[in-house]
Amino acid sequence: MDRNRNNGTKDIRLVARGVNRMPFGKFLYLLVPWLIILAIGMYAIFLCLAKGLNQTNMDNRFAFGVWIFLDLSIIALGAGAFFTGFLVYILKREELRAVLNSAVVIGFICYSGAILVLMVDVGQPLRAWFTFWHPNIHSMLTEVTFCITCYLVVLSVEYAPIVLRNKKLKEVPAFLAMQYELHRIMPVLAGVGTFLSFFHQGSLGGLFGVLQGHPFAFREGLAIWPTTFFLFIISAAAAGPSFILLTTWIASRVSRKRLVSDNVFALLARISGSLLVVYVMLKSIDTLTWLNRTVPSLGLSGIGFFLWAPFNIWILFAEIIVFGLVPSLFLLFGSGRLRTGWLVASSVMVCCGIVLNRFVMTIQTLSLPTMSFDRFMIYTPSWQEIAAFLFVVAYGVIIYSLSFRYLRLFPQEIEMKVN
Amino acid sequence: MANGISRRDWMKLVGGSAIGFMLTPIPWKILDESAKWTQSPSFPYGRQREIQIHSNERISFSHTTCTLCPMACGVRVRCASERGRGSLEAVGITGTKGHPISDGSLCALGVAAIFLRYHPSRLHRPVKIIGHGKFVPVSLDEAISDIARAISRSSCESVAVLDNQPDRAISHIYRKFVGELKNGFYINPPTCDGVPTRLTDQTLHTGDLAFGYDVNDARMIVSFGTPILDGWGTQRQFASISEARRCGGDKKLKLIQVETAHSRTAQIADEWIPVRPGTESAFALGMANVMVRERLCNIDRLRMYSADFDNAAGDSFMKLIEKYPPAYVSEKTGIPADKLVEVTREVARRKPAIVMFGGNPGSGPFRLDEQLAFMGLNILLGSIGTKGGLKPRGKLPSPYYGLHGSDDSNHLASMKQLSDIPDGSIGVLIMDGADSGCAIPWETVERKLSPAGHTIVSLAPYLAGNAVHADYILPSPAYLETADDVPTPSSATVASYSVVSPIFSAPKFSVRPNGFINSLAEALNIRRSSRSDFSGMEYILKKRVEKLHSMAKGNVFNAETGRSERLSGLSLPQFLERLKKGGCWIDDGPAELPPIRYSFLGGTHLPRNNVPVQGEGNNGPRELVLLPLGTRGVLTAAQSNPIMSKLYQESGLRMSANTVSVNPSTGRAAGLKDGGKARVRTENGTAYVMVRFDKSVMPGIIQASVVPLTKSPDRAEPKIEDSVIDICKIDSDSTWRITNAMIEPA
Amino acid sequence: MLPWVYGFTWQTGNIIFLSIFYSVVAVILGSFSIAAIRAFRDLKPDRLDEIRWHFDFESLPEFAKVCRHAFTGEVNQRVCRNGFDCRTCKVHSKITGVPRITKSVYSEGEIPFGLKISANCLYHRGHTWVRVESDGTLTLGLDKLAEGLVWSQCEADLPAVGTRLHVNGTGWYFRKEASRARVLSPVDGEVIAVGGRKEGFYLKVNPGNDSDLRHLLKGLEVGPWMTSEVERLEMALGASDGAVSLADGGVLLDNIAANYPEQGWEDILALMLLES
Amino acid sequence: MTNGNQVKSLTGKKHNFGMVIDVDRCTGCGACMIACAVENNVPPGPVDATDRTGITLMRVYKADNGMDFPDNESVFFPVSCQQCEHHPPCVSVCPQNAVEVDPATGIVGQIPVRCLGCRYCMAACPYHARYFNWWDPVWPEGMERSLNPDVSLRMRGVVEKCNFCFHRLQAAREKAAAEGRDEIKEGEYIPACVESCPTSAMTFGDLLDEGSEVYRLAQSNGSFRILERLGTGPKIYYFSEREWVRNIAEKDPASALKRGATTD
Amino acid sequence: MNTTDAINRNASKGTDDVRGKTIFFFGIVGMLFLGWIIFPFFIYAPVAQPVQFSHSTHAGDNVGLKCVDCHSYDKDGRFLGIPGTSKCAGCHSHTIGVSDEEKKFVDEYILRHKEIRWVVYSSQPENVYFSHATHVKVGKLDCETCHFGHEFTDKLRPARFSRISGYSIDVSGSTLLDIPSTPSTGMRMDDCAGCHNKRGHKESCIDCHK
């Protein structure tokens, strides 16, 4: 007889008050597959660190492999953290407080995961700090490194009060006081986080946009940044809310609870949709400019890039229309009217679109030949690469699950029980 | 609670320590030092490498001559000696500047050769092979007594020495040794680079006078499959061809490559004439036909000097070429008749012209009757003995006899080729370690071995190439350790001579070939009185140099100064000193051409009245022609030098072992995929290959690269996979030009 | 990175980049340090109580924060934003200035769900009552709902005599084994006497001179509030197939807590005592 | 970083070393690749190294006129680091200044011990002239005794590339210093690949020295550079008398596809 | 816990505070001691020279050798570093009898034709290029500029090598955070860079790093 809603939860001392969580055994049971993936991923990472990057299928041509592509993707998807923080603390959209904590956790997961993979991805992780010690400020990667590291610190500081508010931890007076005081400075951090995110999302775009050696990726600049700098910022800002919407929906499906009110979904959809419309517009202008101006000025014809199978012209069409324009219209005009399911589906498409864009910028760029006697190349990641990435996914799922279980990610959860 | 240390106290201690920790140098120093560790030689294994790169080493240079192929390149070895370690090591190698034969250039094999002393397949003791790839150490004495026993037992079978680089001092020792035996053979592989002396003897009746190609003055080279731009000839000849091809106007050398395969030379020649497989000689006879018909040659003169040029009775060259009118040749070769006529006219116009043939280290020599056709073309062109044509070169003295012979020469075994040896006749085979640069498919040797049992001894320092087939491997000193000499390269028109003095002392386990022959002779009780004749390389070389010095002609190159002096101005010790320090003697010019008569159809060998055109007719729907192609040093240790992975494995420059190129249409018809694996089947066996589609390859051809199999270089492995050359069809005359094959996806 | 590190150049771009970086680092570290220093300073019982209440109140769901005036119908649907401290609430002072309109379904003294409401008591939303004694001291105790919820065999950490209490600060703790529940103090003042289990857990408090009890519920507010609290309890217990159902309007079980393991019950008790 | 004009080089004169490769002479023999690997202590690739993971600081590419059998003609392009002069793509992208242009010689230097192994420079280089050490540098036993003492080994996990055998320049400078000269003599310094070329297809020298052979060839009619249109100012010039060869340098890689060929 | 306990707790709070702070500061001080006093000894491993040698004796008035008399150059300008025993044998072909160490040196090395495996204080890492010829002959630097005081040493101190990187303390330095200090040994990268900057030499990384 289920006399207590938290019956069987051995860890009830840690679970927040007033919410229902599945029994601890079941929770563990659900985590087991992810723990296995985590272990395999750890082994793969160990192999890469101990034996070197020959464990991957990267090569001199595909110097950037699947990791960089996925890093770019998850950092774009993690943009929800900065953008929600920006909306809540700077623009005072208090409705979004309902997903703010979740957004912070997702941001933390994405950024820490990305940095973790980057540490495995570089050949000499022990020299990583050289970038701080001897920075080349002209490199987009320097900008990225500085901003991402700082932003991870910001995210950790933002995540800290959420952790400290855990039922058990807050009994420690110092923790209680600390979370309270951290909470008070949060608008400052949100501001800094927005600033940092703005630059590193952009710099990630600039990373490939500045490559004059790769006309496929190269974009002309506005001020000192190529146009991809700005496109990446807008696309990340657009994808962030979509991803928050998506993860919130998944969390609510998995936990079988309503976690936020529908109007929060609608608001997220509207924000994402409107930014995406702007993005699609700018991206189209940029693509046309690039096709008609940049590429011809380098003595090539733009369409030549889209003749190589399997990355034919469909990839451009898919990126801009199928995964860009279509979901943006759904999100923008359907936010008030459509059912949540439609919004979720559109969000999935938005996220796919962003991932596809990052794929095009990294993998497709490298696969295209630059010299006429070059070959077109494709590359298949090794299991170590896949496993190391799945490690991050598993790490994210586990961190998020633990956070969801023991921390109050969704303040509206108790209220939602009433309605 | 108040007494004892509570958890809270621990927390405080840890907190305080953590803050204190950050204020100490520990974390920062470890961060810094760990980064320095990644920069140090102990990364990543935590211990220092045994050999570190020291910049304080004393650097010296030594000059010597390369022994990797017969082309006699001068090399300058950069040696480092580190104090404390005491030993001298080769740390760099370049060509000797101004060297009369190589002029400071080296090929890829030569540049990489400093590593050969440490080649993974080098043997460090005499071994006895006891099965596929398995061997046990054996003492030298034991090996010699075994071999001696085998020799005395094989009374009906013969004892043969296979010497890849003839006319060295050691070659003379071998010849003397087998000459002492009852039925000894001294065998040389066919030359890759020069004109076969046997062919010149057949057609020009010049005896053992050797001919080279005077490419310096040629304006036209018609090459029937000779890898002229891919390892043929001496470095100076190669450079001169390259230079002449770039010249403008009259002096420009034009290179026409007549070859089925799209070889490296075919790729970059001025013109590539892709004849059908096996029809090179038909094309040559077609050219002859056009020349005669259009009076592009001095027919009257030919009639005067040749008995079989135009002979009303019996066979004659005219009769032969009459069968090859352009239309017929076109049909056979697949080359338009116009093209044949045009090419012939151009060749006849652009004299001096040379016709070269054969010599690809992978595809081997042409058959003698084919060679006759090419030689005939040379005669028609008037290229024999003329500037820019084929020129005879002077002979070098033997350590045992002077130029004009002596009693001693009677005891030297005559020089034979594999095709001269009756099948199944060799009981004991001794293979010299020197590389010829060309492939000798094992089957060509194998079918000469006695089926009743045979013993094979290899004197190679490595377990590579044909040494893997030996019963005993007695490792001779490796490159830069060996004392040797290098006679005139076979493509040269001027005689030359270099001495190879060891830069590094040979390791104790190594077996000097002359010492081995000496011990063997002793064990066989041969000529105890003249033991010294076999031993002491130093002595033999000195004797030869002495005889050379007494000729008192030619120039001597001094490697240290880069200048040449007249030999006549040098004393014998000076001459010897120059030669020992990487110098080179070079003759004043080509030899005198004796009055000659031409025999187009060969002196002793009856010509076939039709040069058969192979590779057609028997092509079933899936039968293709397998063409093996190699580059110099194919299947030798020099070629499988680990660093050669840069060319074969780590870049697309050369195709790795068992890679075949096929035309996409051929490949697709056979169901193959570009980059996929396939199985090539011939009547001799099956080889597994990688397929590369190459639209420049002739349809219907499987162009296969012959390279040492790179896998597991560290140990001798049972031969699991056949190399492409192992499945080629070997003709009775030890040639393997054409093999019909099938290819299917594997 | 630093001017004396090898390779540093005084280029404009470098200076701009690094100044931005150092500014960002300074802002992050600065604000973090400020938070840390403030937190260190906050480590005083009174301040901690304040923070705790701030946090607890923030974490209450909206429906638990209904304004007292919404219970009486004086305003429609208002949620308290002032930590239930009507003394400093502008809306409260405004509303109390106008005549009351009552929509309450309960009259004074009526007992919803069998809970007794004492007319001469003021109620605090943390389920304590306050009785003003004739000598001006205040007596504090648990209301019936809370009394029913508290574990039967439990101990109480009552404050020492002389301790100062603060509104919404810690009154006392109930403790059973590893579980614990905090009772909010409804008033300011100094503890002058305590009553243990036998006496039914009460405190006597001297409120001092400026005693202000405006924030406490009284009269018509209490009934609807109590009703909403019972609903909240019901929800906390879970409307599922629990043995404890309050919907029948029956008498609240005295030992409702006995049916629950302490672990789980602690949460329900704490929720009802406004702890999150 | 530093402006070239203000630089007082350690030995005085400013150079701009460059190379001209006569591709009409190149037979693709690979001596330059081997000479380079031997000179620069590049280890032989391990068994599973491929043309995509191997290290060849100098790599000879085969190019052709795009025609089918029998009209196909080939040409070989030895491609090493092109030592770009204007904004080399690899220099500005390196996050930690491990790549820089030596203002005194114009040589683009790569410092393996500073390199983090992020490989951004490899992605940036349109010539694919940068190579990553996927493996530990390992030679068959004993072979490391034959390593060049003037060149350090690159550890696993860093990027390396051609630096025109800078150690040879240093040796030449040291020799000049020992002989009391301020400046090296012409011909004292040439990279290993140039030295090894059997057909003398490569000419090396100072592009600032108007009397030099390399200057003359670089200015001559048939000279061209690969991907000159990108504006990076490569200092390796190529030379050919054949027009179709010269056109290869700037040809759109997709031009074959545009004619309808398939990508196989 | 009951009420009295609570009172007790409050009373003991003051002493608890002092105690807590003491423990906290003990943690800090202990770590500082460990980090600044113990750790430097731990991270560098001393390596003794195989044979003792007195620079001051050889360079002093009695013998009067100049540095270059033993530390010479090859003809291509290479610095040959520490001379081989053959050079020592010029004087010490047999024991002169100046010290026990000399006897040991003659017996164990000279007579056996063995080279001494000196431990070099100034051995630069493999990735460093340094030309003595350029610095001494063109740059006109004295040996003392970098190896100052070495000439006057009477004993060879043990060399100290980092246990992590294996670099000599004389070339890789012991400073914290690269904060400039007086050049301690003269052979660290900062010393090189400082000297070059002072003299206005601009150099590239590849000038010194190979």
Image (cartoon, rainbow, N blue to C red):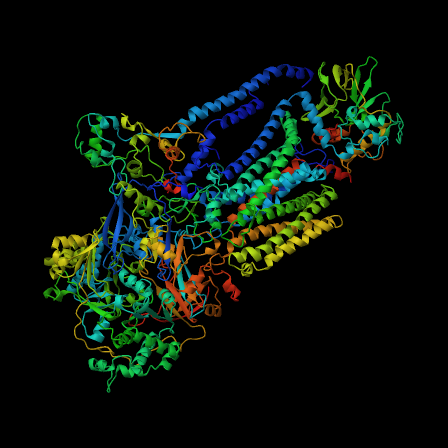
Name, please, the residue furthest toward the top: C135
Residue A108 appearing in the image: no
Q: How many marks?
A: 0
Is E1 on the left-hand or right-hand side of B644?
Answer: right
Q: Residue at x 65, y 21 (%)?
A: C44
Residue B166 drawn at (x, y percent): 22, 63
Is C29 on the left-hand or right-hand side of B24?
Answer: right
**Closest to the observer: B561 or C162?**
B561
Choose top left, top right, bottom left or bottom right for residue A392: top right
Choose top left, top right, bottom left or bottom right for residue B177: bottom left
Residue B559 drawn at (x, y percent): 21, 53
Is A340 on the left-hand or right-hand side of B20?
Answer: right
Residue C120 drawn at (x, y percent): 86, 20
Compared to D111, does D18 lie above or below? below
Q: Residue at x 64, y 17 (%)?
A: E9
Residue E60 appearing in the image: yes
Choose top left, top right, bottom left or bottom right for residue B196: bottom left
Is B456 on the left-hand or right-hand side of C12?
Answer: left
Instruction: Tell me the quadrant of the picture where the N terminus of chain B can be found.
Output: top right
Compared to E10, does D51 lie above or below? below
Residue B688 drawn at (x, y percent): 42, 63
**Closest to the observer: A248 or C99?**
C99
Name, please, the residue furthest toward the bottom: B312
